[in-house]
Image: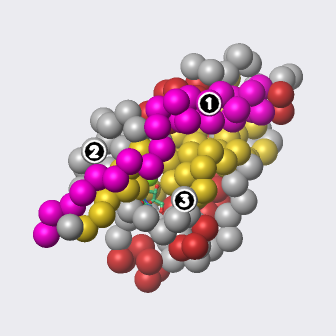
């Protein structure tokens, strides 16, 4: 069965949304050294655009990786952490986790709880997309780009089977 790409969010909309988020982060962290932690791989494009719209100096940019989207994760209610920042990059720091899409909430919830273990000064979440209809674990998104329906999203860093990450716009996959 082949799949169709259906256009959902344009580059223009993405640019204005990342600007809006960056402005809010600039205001909230004016005198607080901020560490951004990007959740790999999906957030890499969003994070790269977001940091270039921030005016505040960043203290650091770190990355974290969790096990991929799949049924094993659903049943356990936990994602597996496969890469994480060093403890000293987190302890005592103001952290914003940057995620591509919050779906069941399991990935972000696991990431936030893991970061909390290292006693950061604060932790907030910035997500490009939210799919609230699929939530299994409650997650507070402090900086949100767009809310989407229960669709399979690709493009702008987000993949289906590692494909489509390079697309500048956001699409959803429709089965033909
Ligand atoms: P969650 O743990 O179910 O919230 O899912 C989070 C992760 O699943 C995201 O970081 C994405 O990598 C992946 N994911 C969720 N929804 C989609 C989608 O529509 N397209 C592609 N990846 C998705
Ligand atoms: Mg992801």
Mark linked to residue 164: 2
For mark 3, does the 10 Å Cα neighbourhood hold few (<14), some (14 to 19), or many (20 or more) residues? some
Whether residue 32 appears in this view of the structure is no
The residue lying at 80 percent from left, 42 percent from top is 121
Q: Residue furthest left?
A: 1
In what element is the residue under mark 3? loop
Residue 147: horizontal and vertical position, in percent? 60, 56
Image quadrant containing the C terminus: bottom left
**On the picture, is 83 further left or further right than 173?**
right
Tags 2 and 1 in contact by the CB under 8 Å rule?
Answer: no
**On the picture, is 35 further left or further right than 167?**
right
Residue 61: horizontal and vertical position, in percent? 56, 29
Per the model, the C-alpha gap separating discs 2 and 3 is 18 Å
- Disc 3 marks which residue? 148
**On the picture, is 43 further left or further right than 36?**
left
Compared to 94, does 160 lie above or below? below
Magenta-drawn segment: 1-26
């Amino acid at each position: 069965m082949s799949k169709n790409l259906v256009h959902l969010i344009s580059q223009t909309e993405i640019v204005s949304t990342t600007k809006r988020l960056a402005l809010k982060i600039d205001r909230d962290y004016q005198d607080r050294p901020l560490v951004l932690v990007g959740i790999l791989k999906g957030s890499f494009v969003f994070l790269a655009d977001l940091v270039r719209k921030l005016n505040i100096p960043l203290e650091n940019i770190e990355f974290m990786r969790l096990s991929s989207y799949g049924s094993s994760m659903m049943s356990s209610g936990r994602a597996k952490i496969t890469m994480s920042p060093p403890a000293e990059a987190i302890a005592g720091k103001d952290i914003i986790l940057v995620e591509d899409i919050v779906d069941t909430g399991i990935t972000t919830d696991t990431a936030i709880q893991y970061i909390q273990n290292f006693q950061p000064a604060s932790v907030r979440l910035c997500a490009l997309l939210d799919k609230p209809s699929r939530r299994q674990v409650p997650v507070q998104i402090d900086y949100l780009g767009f809310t989407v329906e229960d669709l399979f999203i690709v493009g702008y860093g987000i993949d289906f089977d590692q494909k489509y990450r390079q697309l500048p716009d956001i699409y959803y996959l429709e089965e033909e």
